[in-house]
Image (cartoon, rainbow, N blue to C red):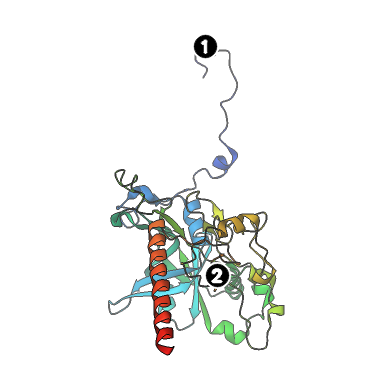
Amino acid sequence: RVDAGAGANNTSSPPRAPLLRRLFAGVAMAYEQTDRTKIKRLPQRGVYDKETVHGILDASFLCHVSYVDDDGTPVIIPTNYARDGSDILLHGKANSALLRHAASGHRICIAVTILDGIVVARSVFHHSTNYRSVVVFGSGKLVEDAKEKEECLRKLVNHILPDRWDAARSPTAAEYAATAVVRVAIEEASGKVRAGPPSDDAADVPHRQWWAGVVPLGLWSQEPVPAPGCSLVDVPQSLYRYSRGCIAPFKGEYDPYGLQECGDCGEGGEAPPPAAQRTRSAAATAAASAVDPYAPQECGCGPEGCADTGATAAVPAGARSSLQGVGSICLAATALGAAFLLGKKL
């Protein structure tokens, strides 16, 4: 019906909903908040939309599965996983107590946590971590069909190492028989995320003697170590570039291999080539000039910085001056000791 008055002559149809909204009409785009999954502490960090929850699950491959065994003992097991649609795939030995429990239809809980950084605040109270986490509740079902089982195992392998299934020997019949796969339906789920700088009290911000910021953390590969009978020449290039998506400390943007703001990240967001083939960019060289010479580099690089990552030290200025003072005292004491010994010898 067209109402009288302004626009009464407008007989055009109302605007149609966006295509994706029409396609997914009636499909829940978020997990329901239940008594088990609703975030009660710092609820503003809670996430329930499936896109975000699934994205966190896809960004990792290590989870912790908890359940209560038959005699009432709580058990928690770390294991690898992969997401397949609205299911979590678990695998292990055919006689695994965890998989037997999950396959019997008992509900289990799966937790995934990705640590993105250590949040260093001006006050001890406000120190924290940046993280992405998901907790899933669901019940499992044993995968018995041979073709489905093979496809699940392929997904698991390729989730951890993309395209690795086709680059390695296929399982034998005995290996298939010794391995069990369980699908766990995601029946309830919620995520919790913290990102960004510390939440310092306003009164503390003007005080510059307390350094504050974020120490970004991420997962990316070092140089592969060949097994006996193999050499570095044989290493597939994909293994040199292995990583899981990391998040820059303040921008919330994905860094493809975890070296945030170091200036040595390659072109177009690609992971760096092997260490021996890398060249330091101008940005990394400039960053290296700020490296604290008193901060030890685990890679063995000197005060000029790390040739592999361009990482810079993050020692507060106050600590730096203290270290310099200690260094001067040590040098002076060494000189006096040497002069004393020389005098006695003469």
Residue 8 pos. (x, y %): 54, 13
| Figure label count | 2
- Residue 242, image quadrant: bottom right
Give residue 239's quadrant in the image: bottom right
Instruction: Say which residue appears at 56% left-offset and 57% top-offset.
Output: 287
Would you name the residue on which mark 1 appears? 6
- The residue beneath circle 2 is 302
Q: As displayed, is residue 227 above or below residue 21?
A: below
The answer to whether mark 1 and mark 2 are in CB contact below 8 A is no
Q: Nearer the viewer, residue 16 or 335?
A: 335
Image-based side of 320 in relation to 10, left or right: left
- The residue shown at (51%, 54%) is 248
Q: Mark 1 or mark 2, which is nearer to you?
A: 2
Residue at image position (31%, 78%) is 70
Evaluate whether residue 67 shows in this view. yes
Residue 342 in the image: above or below residue 31? below
Considering depth in this image, is 115 or 316 the residue closer to the camera? Answer: 316
Instruction: Kindly give the residue lying farthest to the front in the view shown.
Output: 346
Question: Looking at the rendering, which quadrant does residue 108 occupy?
Answer: bottom left
**Mark nearer the N terminus (1 vs 2):** 1
